Structures are given as structure tokens and as C-alpha cells.
Amino acid sequence: MMLLGTLPQSLFQPLAAPGASVYARLLLDIYRQTQARPDPLSRELILSLIYQQLAEPQALALTDDAQSDEATTPDQIDPLTARASAIVRYLDRCGWLKGETLSDFSVHYILPDYAFRLLRVLGEIAINEPPALAGLVFSTYALLQRILTEPDTAYVGIPQAHRQTQHLLNGLKELQQNIGLHINQILAQSQARDVLEQLFLRYREEIVDRAYHQLRTTDHISRFRPGVLSSVTQLAVPDILKPAAQRFEQEPLFALRKQLGEITPLAMNEATFTQHQRRAQPLTANDRVGLTALHANAGLQDCAGVIGLLLAADRKLEQEAVAPRSAIEWLNKP
């Protein structure tokens, strides 16, 4: 996993700066606004969020690093305005924001995918949100039961059941670590009063009531285990898994074709191939395998004619074999 190659090197620079608390509150505010709005955030909205944070005591002094590499601010510009603009540029440079200039020359900002996911997790930590385990056992059981009654949904249902199971396992591991932490804290107490407080107040509030109670009652794993295992056994047959796997592989292509609509070849159809076949090259083994799979794909039936012709002739025609004038004439056809 190339984590450091995926994230910008300066991404965490604001969170390690003297103004980390200011930047953290600002980024979480931006994240909440992004969740609440369907469109990218305008520069004006970003600036208004920054002004709110700069109103806090010492915020202006703590964010000096935002314009450390900026040009000197002219005296006639308001320091607050200059600092807010510098912070926008700083967060953009560090990779937390990505600016987009629209057709009317206004600038809007989005959160890159990695920033959105990081801020979601940091937001959950900030409010001490418990692991979302409630209902995962039942929903996985119900999903598998639904697949048994509607096998044609297996291509989407089985991967979703796997994702929910992984989510449950991760949450249980997190819960296990927290239980171990509380046990160590109990063992570290020397007074009976502190032991009872840790066990019956903190442990109950932070572990039992927040996450563990439902797993031991209404969403108990043992309650749904027989049904889950029975469903998995019934689904683990080629008649269900093979079509589901094929559909799962083809789904991105179906989605793309739905967005693109009908595809017409540019200077390449049966007539063009026949006309220039003398310049064609033999198909390789990989070519034949790939073309055969494409020919059988239901999402490419409008291209089946030319693909079938290539397979029958066992030859391929490179794009360079067609004269540019032919392509231009093809484009100019009514």
C-alpha cells in the first residue's frame, strides 16, 4: 500500500502547526458544509467560515504560517481579509481543498476524496461517536435471505454482505481493544472506590451502553448465525456464483454504456476493414481472448458485427492503416 504516495506530502502540515486547533475546526466546518450542500462550496462561503474561526482569540497569530511563503501584504489591505485568503491558498496547497474555476470565472472548492474520508473519521473521533455496529448482523442476515429469493441480485448483494461483514469485524476489533484498555485501567486502580467507578460508570457508559448492549441482545450474533451459515451454504453453488461473478465484472461496463449511449465507430466498420484488410495484422492469442470476451458481452451488441468480422478474419486493423482523409470524410457524413 503506497499511502505516502497517495496523499500529498504536506497534507498534515496544518494539523501539526501552531494553529492546528484553528485549522482542525475550520476543516470540520468545511466538511459539514460539504455534507449539507449538493454543489461545491463557493470561495465566499469558505472565506466566511474562515472569518468565524479568525474571530477566536489568538487565531490570527496562530495562523501566521498560512502566509509564510506568500508575498508581503500591502498596507492598504485589511489584515483579516489577507489572512483569510492566505488560509484558502494554504489549504489548497496542502491538499485539503481543490479549487475549480467555473465558466463565469467564479471559484468553487471541493474536498478531494481522501480529505473527505479523513475528515469523516476525524469528525467521528471529535464527538466520540461509537462504532456503528447496531443492526449490522441483522442486515447481513436479511440481505442474504433476499438473495436466496432473488438470485439475480447476487452480483450486488454478495459484495455488499462482504462489506458489511468486514465492517462488523473491524468494529468488533475496535471494541475488543477498548475493553482491554478499560481492564488495564481497572487493574491500575488501588482504591476500591476507583475500581467501582471505573467498572460501573466509565466502562458501562463507554462500552456497554454505547456499543456492546445491542450485540448482546437484539442483534446478538448467535441469534442470526444459523440463518447466515445456511444462506451462505445455499448460495455457494455455481448456478448462483458464476452468473453473479460475470455480472459483477460487467457492471462497470454496463454503467458506462448507459452514460455514453449508442457508440458508433469512427472510420472503422465492416466496410472499412474489408477495404483496408491488406494492411491488417494477425491477431495475437491475447487479442483473440479479449475480442471473444467482448463479442459475448451483452453490453456491446451494437459493436458485435465488426468484432465478429475481426475474429472471423483472425486479423486486426491498426488505426494508422486508415488514411486521415477517410476519417475526415466519415465525420462529415450527414
Image (cartoon, rainbow, N blue to C red):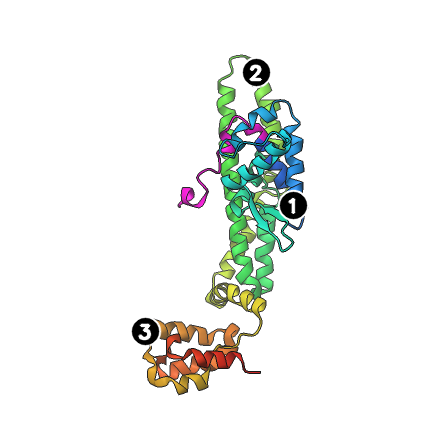
Based on the picture, tell me whether residue 57 belongs to the magenta stretch. Answer: no
Real-space CA distance between mark 2 and mark 1, rounded to the nearest whole angstrom: 52 Å
Based on the picture, tell me whether residue 18 belongs to the magenta stretch. Answer: yes
Disc 2 vs disc 1: Cβ atoms closer than 8 Å? no
Query: Which SS class for mark 2?
Result: helix
- Note whether 108 is above or below 159 in the view shown: above
| In this rendering, the label closer to the viewer, 2 or 1 | 1
Residue type, label 3: Ala
Neighbor class of circle 1 (other Cα within 10 Å; few <14, some 14-19, many 20+) is: some
Residue type, label 1: Ser
Residue type, label 2: Asp
The one of 150 and 83 positioned closer to us in this rendering: 83
Q: Report x, y in % for residue 42.
A: 65, 45
The residue under label 2 is 194
Residue range of the region highlighted in magenta in the rendering: 1-22
The one of 88 and 297 positioned closer to us in this rendering: 88
User: Which of the marked residues, 1 or 3, is nearer the chain's N terminus?
Assistant: 1
| In this rendering, the label closer to the viewer, 2 or 3 | 3
Q: Which mark is residue 33?
A: none
Q: Residue, x 52% and y 33% (percent of image)? A: 14
Neighbor class of circle 3 (other Cα within 10 Å; few <14, some 14-19, many 20+) is: few
Neighbor class of circle 2 (other Cα within 10 Å; few <14, some 14-19, many 20+) is: few
Real-space CA distance between mark 1 and mark 3, rounded to the nearest whole angstrom: 53 Å
The residue under label 3 is 285
User: Which of the marked residues, 2 or 1, is nearer the chain's N terminus?
Assistant: 1
Q: Residue, x 56% and y 28% (percent of image)? A: 63
Q: Residue 42 carries which label?
A: 1
